[in-house]
Amino acid sequence: MPTFWNLLDWPEITEAGLDSLAMLGGALCFILLLGLPLGIVLHLFARRQLLASARTYALLSFVVNIVRSVPFIILLILMMPLTTLLTGTAIGIKGVIPPLVAGGVPFFARLVESALREVDRGVVEAAQAMGATHLQIIWQVLLPEALPGLLAAATVTAIALVDYSAMSGAIGGGGLGDMAIRYGYQRYETEVMLVTVALLIVLVQALQIAGNRLVIHFTRR
């Protein structure tokens, strides 16, 4: 009789795992590039900050909150026309990255804003007293001081992306989530469901451990 391991199509599982990593890596790069500046801008326009402007902050915050309030599975569907226009397809790895980025940027930006808010205001005021420009304060004070918090924010975002990418399997997004739905749910192949869930757990744990080590390494003692 075939054993549990022999029932599984390991080449296909491996390909699905690599697809999940590709979605995670591709989306995370764009999210970090877009979310970090957005988070910095949110912080700068917040009350009692360098460029404090209640109206500007309220507008930016409103837009960010709107995108964050849309459930990811709905965002996937809403963005299908735009995703098709940008990538030529609404399914597969290329079809999932734009919604992942759209959902992840405001999420990461809020975490960046929170990390920057934790920087001691006295350090910023000292830099201002020495004549530092706003750009110098951002690059030489805010970002270095908030680095552990920013790394923790990137870790949380990466783990959230694992969840989002798995959810994209509901519309044929590819990766482990797609495999779990097609085989584990639709075909009642319980062994496939168990393995894909186990692999997702391992991926999340690996990301958390790596993130924690980076935070500890860059935390000033």
Image (tube, rainbow, N blue to C red):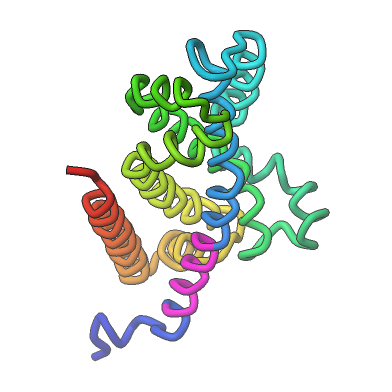
Task: Locate residue 84, reporting x and y percent.
Answer: 78, 55
Q: Quadrant of the N terminus?
A: bottom left
Task: Locate residue 33, reporting x and y percent.
Answer: 58, 49
Q: Name the residue: 62% across, 56% down.
A: 96
Q: In the rendered view, would you say 148 is above or below 214?
A: above
Q: How many marks?
A: 0
Q: Nearer the viewer, residue 117 or 145?
A: 145
Q: In the rendered view, would you say 14 is above or below 1?
A: above
Q: Name the residue: 43% across, 59% down.
A: 185
Q: Quadrant of the C terminus?
A: top left
Q: Which residues are magenta?
A: 14-25
Q: Name the residue: 52% across, 30% down.
A: 132
Classify residue 76 as left or right of residue 210. right
Q: Nearer the viewer, residue 87 or 113?
A: 113
Task: Locate residue 82, reporting x and y percent.
Answer: 78, 47
Residue 17 forms part of the magenta stretch: yes
Q: Nearer the viewer, residue 181 or 52?
A: 52
Q: Nearer the viewer, residue 29 or 69?
A: 29
Query: In this view, which residue lies farthest toward the top?
Result: 54
Residue 92 forms part of the magenta stretch: no
Predominant secondary structure, magenta span? helix
Q: In the rendered view, would you say 149 is above or below 207?
A: above
Query: In this view, which residue lies farthest toward the bottom?
Result: 1
Query: In this view, which residue lies farthest toward the left?
Result: 221
Q: Name the residue: 50% across, 17% down.
A: 49
Q: Quadrant of residue 23?
A: bottom right
Q: In the rendered view, would you say 91 is above or below 108?
A: below
Task: Locate residue 78, reporting x and y percent.
Answer: 70, 39
